[in-house]
Amino acid sequence: MATDYKKIISDIRKRIFHSVYLLSGEEPYYINLISDVIENEVLDEAGKEFNLTVLYGRDVDVRAIVDYAKRYPMMASHHVVIVKEAQDVKNLEEIQPYVEKPLDSTILVLCYKYKKYDKRKTLAKTIEKRGIFFESSKIYEEKMPGWIKSQVESSGYSITPKAAIMIADFLGNDLSKIDNELGKLYISLKNGSEITEKLIETNIGISKDFNVFELQIALARRDVLKSNRIVNHFVANPKENPLVKVVIMLYLFFSKATLIKYMEGKPDNEVAAAAGVNLFFLNDYKTAARNYSFGKLIQIISIMREYDLKSKGLDSGSADEGELTREMIFKILH
């Protein structure tokens, strides 16, 4: 059975357990979330002493995992066996015979991180039928503001659209780091409070004036002075806004602005849906579409590809990252 992480966690808290969980994927955040709930909430403190076994893939083989999984619980309903970093277990497929006939009183959790386990393999198919096969996929950069908004609302707070974008620009798609920073914010807020740009600037140290979001707006308006001020800040603080991140975010912005240029005259809701843009921010993209010709927008996409290669050390010559950033912004604006 494959399902979403909220359903898995909800079932665990309702004491609906499965004998085997294979948690796989490129995004470790959800894998950690599910395994932590199993580790911390299935057994009480007394039960954990005898019935919780945490193993690490690099230290065990399949035979050892099966030996632990076949142990009966002591004075508890279940024995929990969690294999962290299961991607390091050699020949993991050899656990197949146990998975076909697992011990009902054991909850075996395989945390297979940073890559997807092949669904076509017999082991994956068996676990899908008899247990939980969960795939944790990376969230793309452009989806992060929406993810942040959803996380904040599920915790009983709200957040302004710009504040969500500021966090996404600053922290990228590192879900664990974002969750940690939001957790720090919640401590000082009353339940139901709104997280604003000012709160982000004060508590997380992200400048509300000097970030990629503000650079996008300045470039959309062809505001040379403001664009250069922001770029100068980036150059002075390279760790906050490395060139590779700036290139990705501007590529996404101008790709959508190009599509919006092509759809000029269509209803806003239709344009926003086609471009995957929140209606709240549509005007920023429309501004870029007004201020740049279709040919120039295509050229900007080409510039982004050029500097994507340069940001990775290819064909960058002797120029440092700061010089490349300034050069790229100059080419966009002129």
Image (cartoon, grey):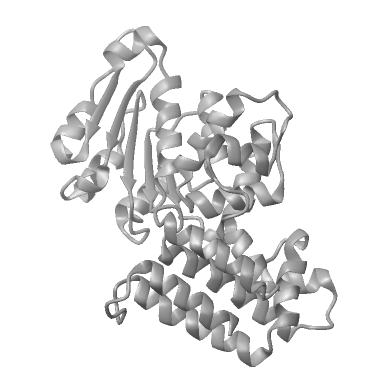
Q: Residue most toward the bottom?
A: 295
Indicate left or right for 310 with 165 as reference. left
Quarter of the image where one finds residue 320 = bottom left
Q: Is residue 207 visible?
A: yes
The image shows a total of numbered marks equal to 0
Q: Is residue 45 above or below residue 321?
A: above
Query: Where residue 157 sits: x, y (%)?
Result: 69, 33
Q: Is residue 69 visible?
A: no
Q: Nearer the viewer, residue 240 or 258?
A: 240
Q: Nearer the viewer, residue 258 or 210?
A: 210
Q: Nearer the viewer, residue 83 or 215?
A: 215
Q: Is residue 6 above or below residue 50?
A: below
Query: Where residue 270 sits: x, y (%)?
Result: 79, 73
Q: Is residue 315 above or below residue 185?
A: below
- What residue lies at 27% left-to-right and 12% top-to-bottom? 50
- What residue lies at 34% left-to-right and 35% top-to-bottom? 109
Query: Where residue 334 sits: x, y (%)?
Result: 58, 85
- What residue lies at 33% left-to-right and 52% top-to-bottom? 114
- What residue lies at 35% left-to-right and 76% top-to-bottom? 310
Indicate left or right for 25 with 270 as reference. left
Query: Where residue 70 sits: x, y (%)?
Result: 23, 26
Indicate left or right for 118 with 236 as reference. left
Q: Is residue 24 above or below residue 309?
A: above
Indicate left or right for 284 with 320 as reference. right
